Structure formats: structure tokens, C-alpha cells
Amino acid sequence: MAPHQLGSAPAWAEREARRIQKAITLLRPGIPGPGGIWADVGCGDGIFTSALHTLIQPSGEIYAVDRDQYALDALTSNFAESYPDAALHSMQADFTRGLSLPALDGMVMANSLHFVPDKTPVLSRLIRLLKPGGRLIVVEYNTSRGNSAVPYPLDDQSFLKLAAHIGLHEVHILSRIPSSFLGEMYAGLGLTHG
């Protein structure tokens, strides 16, 4: 990234560097290396999309999916400013109703499943988008007690059971970080059979 002129506002990725670094810490153990076609499902403002981009560049491609067009517009603008060469495709869609995407090497769902009351049918549909051996990485708060911001939590043990139940294998917790909001966040991984 080019240095900024004196007095100019820093690029989005610089302003959000601490949040992006935390996201990288959570995702890194589940990303096998550069490249591949990935989706960030329920991408919101793009913090985890940015972390994913950092981990799969220079040849990786990302589909950023969210139902909020305003968030997608901000993400697209932020990526154009901070990562002008990124292969990013934004898609407005409700992931609970199914998605039309190319076969994916991996899918990140960061802080999106805690808005879904019945996770089994949604995840069962979504993992069909993954190639054989594809990776599902889920990032959530490690709590079983919901609140208005996390109405349907998915703690780590529930993730492990759910991922195995829908047919993923090599299911395990990748990483954990402290959270000032609900104590701890975790990243969990499951692979499709291949």
C-alpha cells in the first residue's frame, strides 16, 4: 500500500487494522494457502472479507454475500480504496434462502449464524456449494446465552456437534481470541468429503 499524503485520511484497512488482525488470527489456521474461490457469507462491513483476502492473495477470489446492500456498498468502496487489485464479487442475498455461487474451495461465516434460529437446514444447503474437500470456517462468540445482538448463539461445543451432524469431517476448533463483548470468540472448521 502506498504511503498517504500528509493530511489525507488513512485507507479503510489501515483504520480497521486491529479488527482485521484479530480476524486474521482466527482464520489463518483454517486457510491452506493462497488462491482458491472463497465466499464470506454474511460479510457485513467486510472485516473478515479483508482478513480472508490477506490470507488468500494474490490469486484468491472472494464472493462477499450479505442481504444489506448498504454494507455491501461500503465493503466494495473500502476494498477499492485498500485492495484495488482484489478479485471481489459482492452479492446481495439472504443466505438462509439459498445461494447461487460457483463451486467454492472455502466458505467463511463470521458472526452470521447467531442470527439464524434453525441452523441445520441452512448449513446443510450451504455446504453443497463447497467442492469436495472444501472448508467451512465458522466464527462465533463462545456463549450459549443469547442477547439482542447475538439472538441465537452457537458455542464451540454446539458448532462441533452441528458440523458433524450435517456431514462435515475433521471438525475441530481452529483458534480462540478474547472478546470484550461476550468473553471469547472461536473459529471452527469442518471439511466436506472429497
Image (cartoon, rainbow, N blue to C red):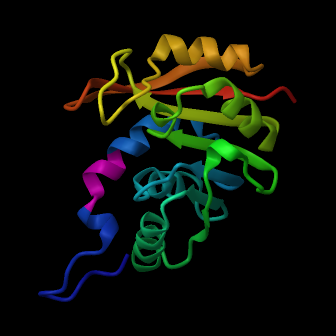
Q: Nearer the viewer, residue 154 or 184?
A: 154
Q: Is residue 55 above or below residue 157?
A: below
> Horizontal placement of 72 versus 136: left or right?
left
Is 164 placed above or below 99 here?
above
Residue 110 placement (x, y as % from top left)? 48, 40
Q: Is residue 17 covered in magenta? A: yes
Q: Quadrant of residue 3?
A: bottom left
Number of labels in the image equals 0
Find residue 117 and report its horizontal and vertical position in percent: 53, 27
Residue at the far left in the pictured view = 7
Instruction: Report the residue at 43% width, 69% height from top.
Output: 70
User: Is 157 on the left or on the right of 88, as rendered?
Assistant: left
Left or right of 39, for residue 104: right
In magenta, the rendered stretch is 16-21
Q: Residue 14 versus residue 160: which sits nearer the camera?
A: 160
Q: Is the C terminus in the top left, top right, bottom left or bottom right quadrant?
A: top right
Q: Residue at x 20, y 80 (%)?
A: 9
**On the picture, is 191 further left or further right than 149?**
right
Q: Is residue 130 in view from this perspective? A: no
Residue 59 in the image, given as x and y percentages of width and height: 67, 64
Say which quadrant the N terminus sits in. bottom left
Q: What residue do we see at 43% from left, 64% from top?
A: 71
Predominant secondary structure, magenta span: helix
Q: Is residue 148 visible?
A: yes
Using the rendered view, name the quadrant where residue 66 is placed: bottom right
Location of residue 192 in the rendering, given as x and y in whole percent from the top left corner: 78, 29
Q: Which residue corresponds to the image point at 33% horizontal and 16% vertical from the top-left?
A: 145
